[in-house]
């Protein structure tokens, strides 16, 4: 399955950065570029449970395609949200449900320097996005 251009660009840029500090600086920059959510969107329904930091994911679907927006109060987590949005947003629900972001993050070496709590939070975000996609694909 081919990844979206936005995600492919991120993966290529990461491949040029050998030092994990440079990679995380880049991830933080991606997060800083995310448009902020409206305060009204930072609600219990959009909050991702299982994350130590505050994380909100908003999804909208246009037919079988899902669009995601998100935000976090932690810089590195906000960057991880940006990477997930690049990977999943704008794709058909079925593709999202079948795409294992955790395996992809592991291939890119993005989880090896995360704390256990951050890694668990990432898994919670991925599970939430894939679960929504599975529900939409089944509908």
Image (cartoon, rainbow, N blue to C red):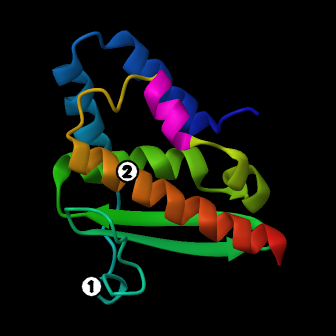
Q: Position of residue 79 (x, y in %)?
A: 30, 46
Real-space CA distance between mark 1 and mark 2, rounded to the nearest whole angstrom:
22 Å
Local crowd size for mark 1, using a 10 Å CA cut-off: few (<14), some (14–19), many (≥20)? few
43 or 127: nearer the eye?
A: 127
| Marks 1 and 2, the one that precedes in the sequence | 1
Task: Give the x, y percent position of residue 3.
Answer: 66, 35
Q: Nearer the viewer, mark 1 or mark 2?
A: 2
- Is residue 32 at all visible to an observer of this figure? no
Q: Secondary structure at mark 2?
A: helix
Helix, strand or loop at mark 1: helix
Residue tagged by mark 1? 39
Which mark is drawn over residue 122?
Answer: 2
Residue 21, relative to residue 61: is it above or below? above
The residue that appears at 49% across and 52% down in the rendered structure is 85
| Residue occupying the point 41% across, 79% down | 46
Quarter of the rendering containing residue 23: top left
Marker disc for residue 67: none
Does the stretch in magenta take in 49?
no
- Quarter placement of the C terminus: bottom right
Compared with 8, 133 (above or below) is: below
Name the residue at 43% across, 43% down: 83
Rendering coords of residue 18 (x, y %): 28, 9
- Quadrant location of the N terminus? top right
Q: Main secondary structure of the magenta part?
A: helix
For the residues bearing labels 1 and 2, Cβ distance under 8 angstroms: no
Residue shown at 56%/44% (left/top)?
87
**Residue 15 seen in the current view:** yes
In the rendered image, residue 4, in percent from the top left (x then y), is placed at 64, 39
Q: Which region is colored magenta?
A: 101-107
Choose top left, top right, bottom left or bottom right for residue 62.
bottom right
Direction from residue 99 to residue 114 in the image, left or right: left
């Amino acid at each position: 399955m081919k990844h979206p251009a936005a995600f492919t660009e991120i993966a290529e840029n990461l491949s040029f950065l050998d030092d994990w500090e440079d990679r995380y600086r880049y991830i933080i920059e991606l997060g800083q570029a995310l448009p902020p959510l409206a305060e009204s969107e930072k609600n219990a329904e959009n909050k991702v449970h299982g994350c130590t930091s505050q994380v909100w994911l908003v999804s909208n679907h246009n037919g079988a395609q899902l669009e995601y927006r998100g935000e976090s109060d932690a810089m590195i987590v906000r960057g991880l949200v940006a990477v997930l949005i690049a990977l999943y947003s704008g794709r058909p629900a079925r593709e999202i449900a079948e795409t294992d972001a955790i395996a992809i993050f592991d291939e890119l070496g993005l989880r090896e320097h995360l704390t256990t709590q951050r890694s668990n939070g990432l898994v919670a975000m991925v599970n939430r996005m894939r679960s929504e996609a599975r529900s939409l694909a089944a509908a």
